[in-house]
């Protein structure tokens, strides 16, 4: 993890309540991999106080784009030309197994934006990719965490269809049943981003379609407030079958097997 | 060199007035005066349910519930790191009761690298009683971290009961309505600094004869110097580390210069 | 309609839970529930020397020293305005001593428009004694504005001594080193809100049976509603008026809707 | 006093530690007169918390420019295109007597920027104007007030010569002795902006050169933190021979006769 000061080259609403912010920052672009995030601050102000989670959205080795909640004060206050202070890379990259030819990515509502970088990466690695949009099933909350403050709003919820022109043609984008037995049986690997309710439904659907839920098969992204990003503040603890783990240092993606959605609240 | 246990047989000498407070964590401590651990308890504690952190304008409310694996495991896991630490380790004790604290203090007595103990009182605990129990159990220097709310009232009794230094202090307790329900947490914010400074100034005027350690809202060397000017011998920094990792070490370097 | 003196013979009924706190001033009060005056004393006071306001990140420290021309002159000058006020005027008394307060209370008894008195205690004053003296001198409803620092400890005694409502409360006292010297002032900041909310929540749980008025850090209708959800019957707004003149009236309108 | 939301069309360092910020705002431009100020806030942030004093620098009925301290956080955070929230007009305009043909304006260090609008106005009214730069004589403080926070830094101090190309040619700009008997005798009216020390020196110099200091002859600008600008907060009280007065509602210019510099601290 390093500290970067980067000039904003783009800051706009991407889709529904999702904001896109981009930087021309080769170092940073190369340091980040799908699944990882950066923590941003517009120094020197103390309001907002905490750093904001920026999720990697796209990166080409020169330019790097992140998504975060368009409702966050940072969205309105950031302008092209501003410098933001970024800590990155944070969290663990999502590495797909070499044998995983068929990758199913499931995003609930606007949380799908957290999977776009991964989808493009998988296509570049010549994997087959289905990006499946799930309707919002989580009841009001934000992912598995509670987000009383806007800081957790990394992606947020919403309805509607992600703009397909932003996707590589190789990506099969589906808006029918994301948890259909057909898809779950087809897939070699699943990554999902959404609410605890989605993850519970996913675990049952996998068990129903494939008889068992193997370790390493499905991973789920935990989207919690992550004030420090380095394991220092314990704000992002999630209860797993291996005990308490921290979304920022042990995640943000966890194996669905290890992930006890019940106690994550 | 600053002596934090000037009224005691066993010293706690620090090379720099900047300490990393309990809750903070750093890998870079070439200049920092001492490192306070996360608060420990005798038995492991799962800590508070989520959310643990609620942001407010200009600050943050935090409630950890003293999540920790219990002192025996902390010692087992960190013993090696503490031995090699360039700065003394001060082990923080979270409030559970005087008996546990005495047991914990005794266990730390001979752990290399541990330079002292920091007791985290809260208004519900009889501070003097707890201090006497720990004092009887260990020769390690004892820092008493008092709630800003009642520090002035209990400071003298804490010194009489054996505290070697006072940490001023624990952040003020706040509340927020989260999803319709009351949610309690302590306030960490730059605006806490004037509250802590006031308590340092008032307690300095009591002339208790032991070092005071300022704590609360420090985000720069200038902030730290303000506490030293107000009568503190040292300061602790924590939440600034969340938004600027490594800032305690940088402040330590600046204050040294 | 909200009754702020439900335990008393003389009522203080407000049409809206938003009050303008002492220190605030507005010309537009079509919806506001009541207006609290600047704190008065019996004799004129020049107030604190400059600076009176010191900004800090996310807030401000203020020390006015209760500058005011003395109650007799205030009444003379504002009597007409008070008579015509659409909302009751609550005259605030700054801490000087119980004897002056009793004299002042007696003088206000029959001033048209004056609906109540707000007593500004500070920790140095025996609140119950002062309350009893004022209670004996007037039938006007009495609001007791307590320091957040010790409100919980003295709340019950204030009710027993005759308070009709509690204002929670006076902002926490802070300090800053200004030009090398300690400068004391109270902290007004959005981050004070969780501290005041916590005190409202804790005192509500005491079940004292009189209305609580929340005060501190309110900058929006949402903030005001948080206090009402925490158990307050009304709230007072002040420093938000500095940065957004007219905000109390706007919040009153929104809370009404 | 009204509330305006205005888009910034210019934000740059004017001179030494003085920042210039300008708006295309005809209403606002016409509402303000030399000597008056606006209070600015970059909502919705609470850091900085208080509004900043912007001193009128130039105004042509369409565009209006203000000066404030370049060290203020607002200077760095404000960008062209941003909207600032302004309360204006505040304070009393400085009206020159119809008979005052020869106007002497004395500015200490960079405080001279507070007099430029007045200088141009006086020239437009066909008065003779001498703009005299005084070296910094006030000891470290900011004007007659104490400015522990940056808010009072309206103008600030500095040394050097104000860039003359910014002045109308009719203005005689002098950098020799601002308090010379020659100038003080020449003048029909004096307006000064600077420290309490300057004002004390000015009062003595006038008494020495003209034998007496008449009421209405010399006015001095008080530059204090003015958080509310409307007389509500009492932060800007100054001790005058007529008792306590408020810089924001009774000033910011006061008659030198009424102004007891001693007790203003
Ligand atoms: C009291 C204490 C003192 C410490 N002192 C030092 C030190 O001196 N030097 C140093 O390098 N590091 C120190 N740490 C930091 C600690 O080592 C870090 O927590 C570590 O980086 C976590 O990695 P881990 O995988 O070892 O912990 P883990 O094995 O993941 O966790 C250890 C145990 O901590 C508990 N736990 C962890 N996270 C949570 C949580 N969010 N909520 C509830 N319980 C949780 C769990 O019960 C778990 O069994 C200290 C931690 C604690 C708690
Ligand atoms: C206790 C009190 C109650 C008020 N209630 C109302 C009200 O109900 N309605 C309303 O419209 N207005 C009210 N005000 C506001 C008051 O009228 C304003 O202060 C007024 O706008 C000031 O104008 P003025 O010219 O009358 O005061 P001035 O005549 O300028 O001042 C009156 C006196 O106040 C003192 N004073 C003024 N400013 C300061 C200062 N900064 N420092 C020290 N002393 C100072 C002086 O000693 C002066 O003699 C109240 C003020 C006070 C003090
Ligand atoms: C994550 C975290 C956990 C903390 N836990 C405790 C604690 O259990 N007991 C305590 O007294 N202080 C605790 N603190 C407070 C710090 O030790 C310290 O008092 C405070 O943070 C200092 O103020 P600052 O953060 O503004 O520098 C914690 C702080 C943080 C950020
Ligand atoms: C200029 C000013 C003067 C004040 N004077 C007093 C005072 O003398 N006594 C008091 O209890 N509160 C005083 N207050 C505090 C307000 O009455 C009120 O408690 C506080 O400002 C409410 O919090 P808020 O400003 O965050 O809304 C003053 C506030 C201001 C802004
Ligand atoms: S974000 Fe601080 S521990 Fe995970
Ligand atoms: S600025 Fe508030 S009274 Fe002058």
Image: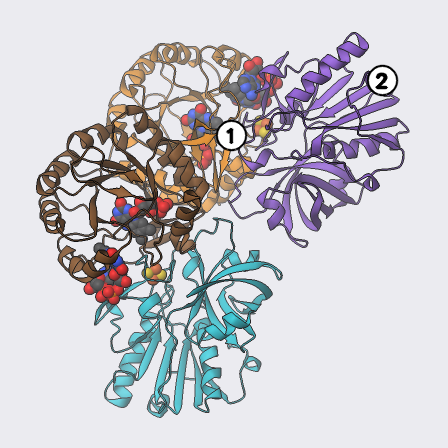
Chain colours: A purple, B orange, C brown, D cyan
Quarter holding residue B119: top left
Depth order, front residue of A165/B123: A165
x%, y% of residue A259?
Answer: 66, 16
- Considering every residue shown, the one lying at the far top of the view is A211
Cβ of mark 2 under 8 Å from ligand 5: the answer is no
Residue picked out by circle 2: A182
The circle drawn on residue B187 is: none
> Numbered disc 1: what chain?
B
> Numbered disc 2: what chain?
A
Ligand 3's image quarter is top left
Q: CA distance from mark 1 to mark 2?
A: 41 Å
**Label 1 SS:** strand
Residue picked out by circle 1: B53
x%, y% of residue D94?
Answer: 38, 78
**Who's the residue at 42% across and 50% down the image?**
C250
Residue B133 position (above or below residue B227): above
- Total marks shown come to 2
Depth order, front residue of C102/B31: C102
Q: Is residue C20 left or right of residue D241?
A: right
**Who's the residue at 51% across and 77% down the image?**
D162
Residue B34 seen by the camera? no
x%, y% of residue D254?
Answer: 31, 74
């Amino acid at each position: 993890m390093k500290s970067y000061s980067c000039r904003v080259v783009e800051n706009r609403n991407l889709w529904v309540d999702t904001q896109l912010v981009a930087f021309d920052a080769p170092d940073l672009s190369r340091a980040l991999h799908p699944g990882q995030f950066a923590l941003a601050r517009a120094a020197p102000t103390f309001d907002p106080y905490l750093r904001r989670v920026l999720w990697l959205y796209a990166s080409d080795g020169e330019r790097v784009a992140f998504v975060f909640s368009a409702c966050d004060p940072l969205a309105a206050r950031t302008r092209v030309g501003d410098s933001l202070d970024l800590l990155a890379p944070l969290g663990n990259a999502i590495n797909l197994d070499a044998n995983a030819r068929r990758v199913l990515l499931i995003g609930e509502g606007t949380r799908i934006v957290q999977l776009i970088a991964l989808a493009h990466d998988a296509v570049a690695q010549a994997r087959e990719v289905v990006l499946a949009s799930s309707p919002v099933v989580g009841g009001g909350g934000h992912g598995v965490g509670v987000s009383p403050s806007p800081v957790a709003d990394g992606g947020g919820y919403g309805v509607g269809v992600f703009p397909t022109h932003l996707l590589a043609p190789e990506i099969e984008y589906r808006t029918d049943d994301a948890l259909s037995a057909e898809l779950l049986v087809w897939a070699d690997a699943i990554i999902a981003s959404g609410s605890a309710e989605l993850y519970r439904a996913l675990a049952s659907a996998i068990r129903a379609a494939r008889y068992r839920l193997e370790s390493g098969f499905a991973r789920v992204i935990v989207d919690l407030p992550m004030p420090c990003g380095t394991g220092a503040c314990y704000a992002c603890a999630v209860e797993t079958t291996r005990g308490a783990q921290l979304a920022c240092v042990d995640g943000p993606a966890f194996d669905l097997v290890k992930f006890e959605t019940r106690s994550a609240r | 060199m600053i002596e934090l246990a000037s009224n005691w047989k066993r010293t706690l000498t620090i090379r720099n007035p900047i300490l990393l407070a309990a809750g903070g964590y750093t890998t870079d401590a070439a200049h920092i005066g001492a490192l306070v651990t996360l608060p420990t308890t005798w038995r492991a504690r799962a800590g508070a349910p989520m959310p643990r952190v609620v942001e407010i304008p200009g600050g943050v409310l935090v409630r950890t519930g003293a999540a920790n694996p219990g002192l025996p495991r902390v010692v087992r896991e960190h013993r090696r790191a503490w031995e090699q630490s360039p700065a003394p380790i001060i082990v923080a004790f979270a409030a559970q009761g005087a008996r546990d604290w005495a047991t914990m203090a005794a266990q730390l007595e001979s752990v290399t690298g541990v330079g002292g103990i920091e007791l985290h009182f809260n208004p519900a605990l009889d501070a003097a009683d707890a201090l006497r129990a720990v004092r009887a159990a260990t020769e390690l220097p004892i820092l008493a971290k008092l709630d800003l709310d009642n520090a002035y009232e209990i400071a003298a009794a804490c010194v009489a009961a054996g505290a070697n230094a006072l940490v001023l202090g624990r952040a003020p307790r706040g509340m927020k309505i989260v999803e319709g329900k009351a949610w309690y947490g302590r306030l960490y914010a730059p605006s806490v600094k004037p509250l802590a400074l006031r308590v340092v100034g008032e307690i300095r005027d009591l002339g208790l004869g032991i070092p005071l350690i300022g704590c609360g809202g420090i985000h720069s060397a200038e902030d730290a110097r303000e506490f030293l000017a107000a009568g503190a011998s040292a300061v602790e920094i924590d939440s600034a580390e969340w938004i600027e990792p490594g800032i305690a070490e940088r402040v330590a370097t600046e204050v040294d210069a």
